[in-house]
Every structure is written in structure tokens, then in C-alpha cells.
Image: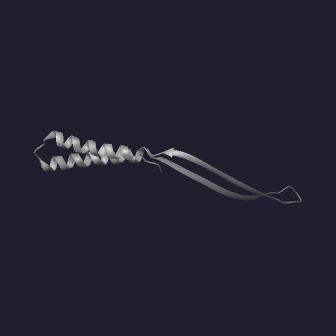
Amino acid sequence: MPLNDSLLEQGIYAAFKRQSAKGEVSKAGVDRQLAKDIARAISVYVRLGTVQTAVTSFGVGATAPHPMVIPVFTVATGTGIGFVI
């Protein structure tokens, strides 16, 4: 899953810069807001990733025209790309 490391770094850096610019007196308030900002940066980082999947299936069946039974084999493959929401 390719992810954008520089985007995460920028988000965390911005979180620290916001806290240093505030000059807030309450350490608990600073810690709480910093945690929220970092969580938001990580959430954006993960949600922008691309999820790639591959599916393979195999089926066996039979047709039954009287008086013969003819076996039927089916193979299906596929790939896809999705996004984390």
C-alpha cells in the first residue's frame, strides 16, 4: 500500500508548529491538542493510501444432458484498486 511519507511528516510538523505558536499555559491542553493533531495527520496518511487486491476463484460443475454428463470447470481471476474511507 503506497503511502505518502512526506505528507505525514508535514502533518506532524504542522501539529508541533501550531502548539509552539499558541503559547498556551495549560500543559494538559497542549498535550491533548497535540495528540488530536497528530491523530488527524495519521488518519489522513492512512486514508490516502491505495489498497490493492487480487481475487482468484475456481468452480466445478456439470451439465446433465441425458444420457451424458459433461464436466464444466470455471476459473475467474481479477484485481482491483480501492481507497480507504
Tell me which residue sits at (70%, 55%) in the image: 75
Please name whichever residue, 56 or 70, is drawn nearer the observer in this view of the structure: 56
Q: Residue at x 58, y 53 (%)?
A: 54
- Judge by depth and name the residue closer to the eye, 40 or 57: 40
Is residue 22 positioned above or below 63 on the image?
above
- Looking at the rendering, which quadrant does residue 67 occupy? bottom right
Residue extending furthest front?
Answer: 6
Does residue 45 appear to the left or right of 34 in the view shown?
right
Query: Which quadrant, please, contains the C terminus?
Result: top left
Residue 44, quarter of picture: top left
The percent coordinates of residue 27 (x first, y second) are 13, 49
Please give the count of numbered marks on the rendered protein: 0
- Residue 49, how many percent across, how many down? 45, 46
Q: Is residue 51 left or right of residue 38?
A: right
Residue pictured at 16% horizontal, 47% vertical? 29
Q: Using the image, determine if residue 82 lies above or below residue 74.
A: above
Residue 10: image location, x then y, percent:
32, 43
Q: Is residue 48 left or right of residue 38?
A: right
> Residue 56: x, y in percent?
63, 55
Between residue 61 and residue 50, name the one nearer to us: 50
